[in-house]
Amino acid sequence: MTTTQENSPAHVRVDGRAKVTGQALYTADHHPPGLTHAVLVGATVPSGRVTGLDTAAASAAPGVLLVLTPANRGRLGQLPDGTRYDGWPPEARPPLADDTIHRWGQYIALVVAETLEQAQYGASLVRARYETAPFATALDDATVVSRPEQVMGEPMQISRGDPDTAWADAPVRLDVTYTSPNNHPCALEPHATVAEWDGETLLVHDSTQWVRGDQAVLSAAFGLAPEAVRVRAPYVGGMFGSKIATGSHTILAALAARRIGRPVKIVLTRKQVLTNVGHRSETVQRMRVGAGPDGSLAVLRHDTRTHAAVNEDGNPSEFHEPTSTMSRLLYDVPAYSATHESARLNVMAPGWMRAPGEATCQWALESTLDELAYEVGADPLELRRRNHAGRDPHHDLPWSSKHLLECYEQGARRFGWDRRPDAPRSLRDGPDLIGWGMATATYPGWRFGATARVRLSGTAGGPRATVSTSGSEVGNGAYTMLAMTAAEGLGLPVERVTVELGDTGLPPSAQTGGSSLTVSTAPAVRDACLDIRVQLARLAGGRPNMADGDLLAEVPGATLTAEASTSPLFLRDGEFAYQSFGAHFVEVRVRPEIGRIRVSRVVSVFDVGRVLNATTARSQFIGAIIFGIGQALHENLIYDPVHGLPVNADLGGYLVPVNADVPAIDVSWIGAPDLAFNPLGCRGLGEIGITGMAPAIGNAVFHATGVRVRSLPISPAELVR
Amino acid sequence: MLWEVRMRISLSVNNRSVESTVEPRTLLVDLIRDDLKLTGTKVGCDTGQCGTCTVLLDGRAVKSCSMLAVQAEGTRVTTIEGANAETGLTDLQEALWAEHGVQCGYCTPGMVLALQDLLATNKAPTEQEIRCGLAGNLCRCTGYQSVVRATLALTGQNGGRNDV
């Protein structure tokens, strides 16, 4: 173990060897004996009804074993609706429910065959006739708009103070509208399922961030006790929110496997991932800020329009990108209001994508504050300091731990912000305009709760520990963090700890989401280790203060086991509000003739409590910062308003950042432990890095060019008009 | 009928000679993954952009999702399973691990082989040359920094920098 400049321990990934050698097995790498392959057929109209589905040619094609359609799907049990956080289908309506079509790409058939090629050919032979109906895939075309009261338990229509009077009285007022397009998590591993039955027992290998969610959905679908469904996901090839819901393909793979009595594998094509896995929905955010002449905020009104899916209307757990969850608490604003409208579109039900709500909110909020800074002639960083919230104004609670001002100070120093001239277009380097911008990052403290089991066994080579919990390794570093936590807790080298993850047969854990896996699970591992130390001390005759080496010498041939759990905690309790913070400082270079924007330098400082592993933390921060570059400059899933399909549903058309887009990045953190949040003092850190990146880039583009772009992705065309 | 056609091909995979009977439409990646069960090679996009299916064909990196199996007739194919050193990890793999050029790991086998190709022709690539050499390999987790840093460290060029 080495120590970084930030005094956090650092350890290489314990799963590194399996990954650099290609030995880590992902879902689609499983080939059980007798395996068959399935391919999904999607609707080619965005709305209407299937009036005829001809499957005769497909059924007769070589190697085809089964063609599943609404006509022969059979009954599925009532799926959980997500409201109890036990399991989540991607859409309220189960797959292949009937002949109505709500969106382009909606599954209308599944073809199972001996080989992948035979299944693909069979799928190409399925012929559908449609009766089409009016549809909308653009916000402006929607005919039905709802006003959701809550998303994930947080109210969406809120007001505090007297926003009307404060707005009327404000000496400085800004009324600006920011938009962001549909984005997609687009993890590199496509969603995949391998399902096999043994009598009335179902084993599913699935690309999921929540094995227990899958278990709840599948056991409900097939009328089984949860214990009769085992879901495994020891390695997941990225997710970013897109593998929380149990995919329709997963339910259909299990159904087909039961029908033909053989294992079935489904791997979504990239086009199906971009079409049938929920995206981050577009937003239109009207921001009205009223302030004093020095930029002190008097009022903030945040009115959002986003979208949901037409067939989700009334589903209590549907997800509307919750844009106002951060604007309500980030700054000290006495008067505040937020409204939220959700248009009904003929698209896949939107889902979660890295920092859902926070990343979109920060785009609008932090860009607007930059505009306010120029309006009142203040430095953008100084404006944020003036409006710093000493306590959470929305929950009216003190923060458990907040070091945002230190993030500002440290970031500004590392970046050299004090050398920044205020005026736009005042920095040049040869043919390039240079711009410096900044923005605040923030993400709530969540803890979904987990149980971990630690087993300590004496072996010939000395004691070894095994940590077991059902949460998934999705790239976050869970294997490593939990091994480090147990090693510290038991006084063992990390190499003597084995971690088992991603299996419903292991102690329960919530989803790997909300930046919460480590903060939920590591404290449980720590407590289980303490329990084992007490057991050891008893064995040693009640000397709890003995040194690690002496304690471990007491490990008998038998095994000591302990389990411990953490409870859920969402944003606040009776005492504190839990929130992480950070600051991004960005330099861009713009070639004015062609509007080309390059991010050339990023300095980011985070306040996320104690960092358990500098190596994995740094990589998570950097990865999320690059996600922010994608949000700012590249990512845009475009629906054709005439035909209703996503037109760029592949990695050639849906642009994600590539190696050449990546600048020098200086990431650091404050590292002050938040011991009110959990005994290890760590808050989650997988998502905060994306929040604030898009506005920091937009603000830098304004500083470089004098052009304020209020729509994402920021297009070169906006800069050469 | 077309789907009844089978073609016999022989090639070398990871220094083992392979005789296989394939359909003309079978992709090289599906031969590797489904028939030979060498699952370290991945599929990520189906359209040749992501690079997770990268293998070496006669020593040069190719995207095995964009080639038919029959096109590999008579060639030497190296997959990630064949890229591993007999005694353990190659220096490149050690560097990627040590510099944390790995998160979810799904892009990693393709990155290893693309870098192996680059380093075979350029012993000391510059940062820009590394980024260009990996232009065909997407990663959604790491932000690429650590992969570039690992390659520079391997060739003794990083000089202790942490901000690459």
Image (spheres, grey):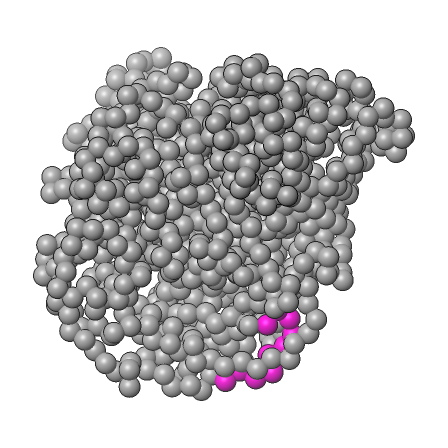
The percent position of residue A217, horizontal first and vertical second, equals 52, 58
Residue at 61% x, 65% y: name it: A644
The percent position of residue A503, horizontal first and vertical second, equals 39, 49
Q: How many marks?
A: 0
Relative to residue A37, is residue A178 drawn left or right?
right
> Can you see residue A168?
yes
The percent position of residue A496, horizontal first and vertical second, equals 25, 30
Quadrant location of the C terminus of chain A in the rendered image: top right
Q: Which image quadrant is residue A94 in? A: bottom right
Residue at 33% x, 51% y: name it: B51
**Depth check, front residue: A16 or A634:** A634
Q: Which image quadrant is residue A379 in? A: top right
Q: Is residue A308 above or below residue A662?
A: below
**Depth check, front residue: B159 or A588:** A588
Relative to residue A149, is residue B33 drawn left or right?
left
Specify start and end residues of the magenta stretch as a single range.
Answer: A45-54
* Magenta segment main secondary structure: strand
Residue at 59% x, 51% y: name it: A182
The percent position of residue A651, horizontal first and vertical second, equals 44, 54
> Can you see residue A454?
no
Relative to residue A510, is residue B135 drawn left or right?
left
**Depth check, front residue: A539 or A645:** A645
Quadrant location of the N terminus of chain A in the rendered image: top left
**Depth check, front residue: A564 or A580:** A580
Is A53 inside the magenta-drawn segment? yes
Is A272 inside the magenta-drawn segment? no
Residue at 37% x, 28% y: name it: B164
Relative to residue B154, is residue A281 drawn left or right?
right
